[in-house]
């Protein structure tokens, strides 16, 4: 159940996407690791160090905005079971996601995070 990686989520209008990616590249002295277009929801995603930048319209981003963090895990199912035992609430999922599986979870303190498990290829 160990946490493998974590990132802050940043939401921006698509018109500010490239400049926001550049800002976080400069802030962390790193380059964008990956860019992804999420099919069917008109959202662009960039992974930049400790930040995930999501770009789209306000309407397209609305379902994603509640989560302020991404937690990458070894085992989604084991972590969800543990989190629920600790008083967390699964808001939706688990479900298939690009490259793996995810769930949206509200922690007992109110933090909402996307839990994500990569699928081995």
Image: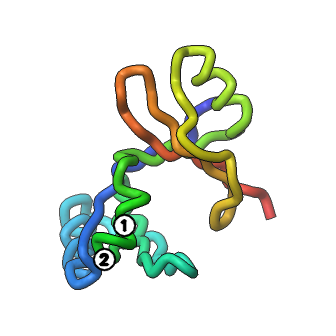
Secondary structure at badge 2 equals loop
Q: Residue at x 32, y 66 (%)?
A: 30
Percent across and percent down for residue 58 are: 28, 70
Residue at the disc numbered 2:
57
Percent across and percent down for residue 19 are: 20, 79
Q: Residue at x 36, y 66 (%)?
A: 61
Residue at the disc numbered 1:
61
Q: Residue at x 62, y 50 (%)?
A: 102
Whether residue 115 can be seen here: no
Q: Residue at x 60, y 22 (%)?
A: 84
- Are the residues tagged 1 and 2 within 8 Å (C-beta)? yes
Q: Residue furthest bottom?
A: 15
Q: CA distance from mark 1 to mark 2?
A: 6 Å
Secondary structure at badge 1 equals helix
If the image is split into quadrants, where does the C terminus sit?
bottom right
Q: Residue furthest right?
A: 121
Give the quadrant of residue 75. Answer: top right
Q: Is residue 89 above or below residue 36?
A: above
Q: Nearer the viewer, residue 109 or 31?
A: 109
């Amino acid at each position: 159940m160990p946490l493998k990686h974590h990132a802050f989520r940043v939401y921006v209008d698509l018109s500010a996407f490239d400049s926001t990616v550049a800002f976080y590249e400069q802030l962390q002295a790193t380059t964008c690791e990956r860019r992804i277009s999420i099919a069917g929801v008109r959202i662009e995603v960039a992974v930049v160090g400790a930040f995930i930048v999501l770009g789209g319209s306000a309407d397209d981003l609305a379902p994603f905005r509640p989560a302020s963090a991404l937690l990458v895990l070894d085992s989604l199912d084991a972590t969800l079971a543990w989190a629920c035992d600790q008083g967390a609430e699964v808001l939706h999922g688990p479900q298939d996601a690009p490259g793996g599986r995810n769930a949206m979870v509200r922690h007992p303190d109110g933090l909402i995070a996307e839990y994500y498990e990569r699928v081995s290829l």
